[in-house]
Amino acid sequence: MGFQKPPGTQDILPGQSANWQRVEATAREICRRFNFNEIRTPIFESTELYQRGVGETTDIVEKEMYTFTDRGDRSVTLRPEGTAGVVRAYVENKLYGEPDVTKLYYMGPMFRYERAQAGRYRQFHQFGVEALGATDPAIDAEVIALGYLFYTEVGLKGVRVELNSVGTPQIRAEFRSKLLAFLEPKRELLCKDCQSRMDRNPLRVLDCKKDQHHFEGAPSILESLDEACTTHFEQVKAHLDAMEIPYVVNPRMVRGLDYYTHTAFEYKAEGIGAIDTIGGGGRYNGLVADVGGPDQPGIGLGLGLERTLLLLESQGAAQSNASIDIYLVALGEAAEQEITKLLHQLRLAGIAGERDYLGRKMKAQMKSADRLHARYTAILGDDELAKGEIALKEMASGTQEMVKLTELAERLLRS
Ligand code: HAM
């Protein structure tokens, strides 16, 4: 009997790691340019943090959390998202005491008990940023631009930005009654999900893919905004225009988490089965206070890394693992010893090298070199060893030359 990974989880195998590392390196590089610094928070937090932060009536808190009681009888939850933990750390470590806006980023696994499908897992990875301490619409636009630049620089095509304003909690409450008045007569026509959302979170009904044809003439949240909200929204758009970030306004887009106020946005692209949202975020001006901190505003985003990688693959933009520089082949016992020394010297010099550890014949070793896409192979036999030289072959061109053992590193670094 063998073991299998839990449903909805994935092994990221060595053959896939080049792509993961490239995507993660791009995220870090973009954060460097935008002056966001990394924060690492625990993978589990108190359950109450998510109940208060993410919201009691969200799908995440109602159905999707990995919650358990630890040996100290505390209820803890594997993080279903990153914002609540970052905000908790911001408050607990009094980062709000610093004079500048706090700009943070994170990357790592998140956990949601969801029905697994292409692009939807129970353990998945997010790259997220949070900017705390400013209400300036310029920072809303900057966060949206950061995510857009990330997708562009990893090489994705066809990513759309959808933008909306979800106003303040008061505005949403008023809009909620208007919307319910519109939806109530249609209740029986709507899908099961919509019917249950009408009772729990009616704003999300408008986001349903199946029932769009029933929503003609539905009230729009944008028309319910007050002057301050409208001005903020207009300014976010103006800053996006200034950076030439393309977007479409979608007044029906509502995010799945409760903490949003004002700006809400999603990144969308086709290519992962039924799923088209690859990232999203928004402003959360009440969250810091909701989890016991001072009245500080925030805005951030979370981008799914699996979805990014799936799309890269479907667009043919995924890469194979990096090749090595050289594969060293030893013929004979004396040469074996020398190769140990030589390979270590090459590695000290920054060169990526490999050798055989299985006592295989030369032909099998050359096949390994091929599989590893070695740029060079070098063969050391007794004769060469006596002369202090090695036969170096460039695999692409097939050209061979004799190189002094003492000069091999320099020769490779020059190529
Ligand atoms: P979210 O929309 O719940 O937002 O998740 C952000 C992204 O995480 C999604 O767009 C998707 O790419 C990825 N994701 C979510 N669930 C799964 C899953 N089960 N499998 C694979 N990928 C998934 C948040 O989490 C907010 N914390 C974003 C944010 C940060 N808002 C403000 N700051």
Image: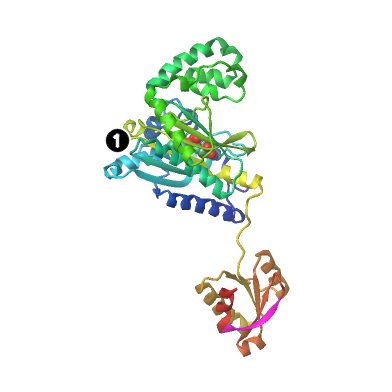
Residue 78: x and y in percent read 44, 40
Residue at 52%, 77% in the rendered image: 345
Residue 291 drawn in magenta: no
Majority SS type along the magenta span: strand
Region in magenta = 399-405
Q: Amino acid at mark 1?
A: Gly
| Near-viewer residue (64 or 222) | 222
Q: Is residue 24 visible?
A: yes
Residue 297: x and y in percent read 34, 35
Query: Secondary structure beneath disc 1?
Result: loop
Residue 30: x and y in percent read 47, 50
Task: State the image quarter where residue 358 is shown.
Answer: bottom right
Whether 256 is drawn above or below 124: the answer is above
Task: State the image quarter where residue 226 is shown.
Answer: top left
Check the image and name the residue furthest to the bottom.
386
Q: Is residue 63 left or right of residue 312?
A: left
Q: Is residue 387 left or right of residue 90?
A: right
Q: Which residue is mark 1?
A: 293
Whether 274 is drawn above or below 191: the answer is below
